[in-house]
Image (cartoon, rainbow, N blue to C red):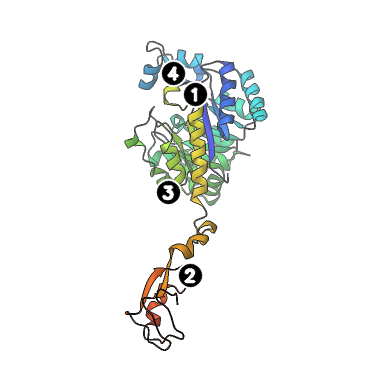
Amino acid sequence: MNSVYVIAEAGVNHNGSREMAFQLVDAAAQAGADAVKFQTFKAENVVTRGAQKASYQKLTTDGDESQLSMLKRLELAHDTHHELVNYSQEKGIDFLSTAFDSESLNFLVKDIGLNRLKISSGEITNGPLLLEHALTGCDLILSTGMATLAEVEEALAVMAFGLLNASNTQVDPSRVAFQKAFLSEEGRKLLKEKVTLLHCTTEYPAPMNEINLNAMHTMHNVFGLKVGYSDHSEGISVPTAATALGAVLIEKHFTLDRSLSGPDHKASLEPDEFKSMVDAIRSVEVALGNGTKVPTLSELKNLDVVRKSLVASRKISKGEVFSENNLVTKRSGGGISPMNYWDLLGEKASTNLAPEQPL
């Protein structure tokens, strides 16, 4: 990825509607996103019947409804996935999805043919599912919300083992085997090639004082991997700032209408806002430049206008010695740089100079 890869996180903001899912693809493409991402799961494989909703989910959906019932309403049929993949291709935008269970992962890789997989923050301690992702050999995007640095390392160790054994598992998985893979030169190489870490604050919306964007630098410095940012904050300022800090990937929830009922709509951007975010990211990308400190082409035409040069402060006769009394610096439109001032002191004028005449 040469530029910041922007993922429009449709997630479950289709509310279980096939028609709305297609509209989200349209909106993401029109906003300039590189990819539109959904979520693939079988509710029974993800949560128990007694699992409670998160606090933010209770506020945005029926409080008496179980998490299982909510998720069942938000499942997308496999046939719809195939249609969305084809439709995304027509619209010139990548299709991505996050798998929350083994059956869904197999579907995305073997049936849909995805070669890039996004792993949710909630799965960062789900070693078996992490291993299954890594064993696919696909490029992996790992969100790190709620995780400590030690938990991120443990997850990467599992993934290093899986990537090393993607073609042929010759070693039984274990924590010792994971750590050996993580510390191996080939394991580190595969992680750098295949894995992008996303900093994330898992709250909807995420409070500004808990964003901690500098954690991106921490993870990059510790693990040496590509780092991006998955945003749950309000507005577009934080993902724009993350771009300026070096994020290679930005993911942001978006919705057709923030007033819709559903767990994620209220913490999402509407299409016009998402386009503003993409535009801001692209502007920051250009503004970052290549880091070489030299005058730009547009600056060169202003150089002689705004920089000062050495001029005569009064009439100077040929042969007169230059001194603090007859030299001054002023904008003159060209001439000798004032950096030569001390070299000229004590030298003799080679010609007559009128007041304010450049040397």
State the image coordinates of residue 249 (x, y, percent, origin top left): 51, 40
Residue 51 picture quarter: top left
Q: Amino acid at mark 4?
A: Ser
Distance from the alpha carbon under mark 3 to that under mark 2: 50 Å
In the rendered image, which residue does mark 3 sit on?
Answer: 222
Give me the residue at 57% from left, 33% from top. Answer: 35
- Label 4: which residue? 259
Q: Is residue 306 above or below residue 266?
A: below
Name the residue beneath numbered marker 1.
Answer: 255
Q: Which residue is nearer to you in this view: 85 or 311?
A: 311
Q: Mark 3–mark 2 contact, CB under 8 Å?
A: no
Query: Disc 1 residue type?
Result: Thr
- Helix, strand or loop at label 2? It is loop
Q: Closer to the N terminus: mark 1 or mark 2?
A: 1
Q: In front of the other: label 3 or label 4?
A: 4
Q: Is residue 280 above or below residue 69?
A: below
